[in-house]
Amino acid sequence: MKKFFHYTTELKLQEIIDSGVIKLATKSTFHKKEKPVAWVSINPIWENTATKMIVKDGVIQNMTFQEQLEQLGCARIQVEDVGFEGWRKLKHTAKMNMDIASRMELVGAKCGASSGESFGSLFPIKKQYWIKAEVFRNGEWVLYENFEKMN
């Protein structure tokens, strides 16, 4: 059975929990017809496309996992399968520009991600479908205390 995780920064985790919903990502919308997606991954360690970018020596590049962990924290929310679509189908369902989708795959592959691990929903993922929230501490995923208190 597949486990689905929404990966984010620890800084953003509490905001997501407070809102009670994993929202649709709208920043990736490249043309008017494209539908926004709530992204999840089946990668059990970390979704490399969730790693943020920084400017280093005048060049925009992805942070390493360690840099993100130290500067922003790494967090995830495990969610129930609410009918997620895999990347191959979702890029069509969401009406993505196929040239841009191909570039996204290439960029993801360069940072160690696999499009086969990417899934999504065209609907926000409500808290009632969340299983647990975790943060990365001392080399392992541990339950996020503020999520445990709410359940």
Image (cartoon, rainbow, N blue to C red):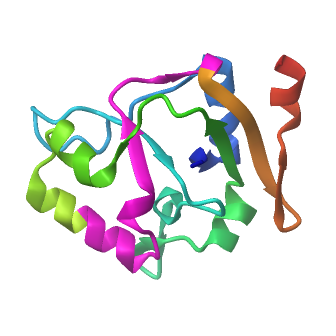
Residue 113 in which image quadrant: bottom left
Q: Which quarter of the picture shows residue 108?
A: bottom left
Residue occupying the far bottom of the picture:
57
Residue positioned 16% across, 58% down in the render: 100
Front residue of 26/129: it is 129
Give the position of the C terminus as an image quadrant: top right
In the image, taking residue 102 as reference, residue 49 lies left or right, namely: right
Q: Say which of 81 and 27 sits in front.
A: 81
The residue located at (32%, 71%) in the rendering is 107
Q: Is residue 18 magenta?
A: no
Q: To which quarter of the image does residue 131 belong?
A: top right
Picture layout, residue 102 above or below residue 10: below
Q: Which residue sits furthest front?
A: 1
Q: Is residue 29 above or below residue 73?
A: above
Question: Is 7 left, or right, of 145 in this rendering?
Answer: left
Q: Which residues are magenta?
A: 104-128
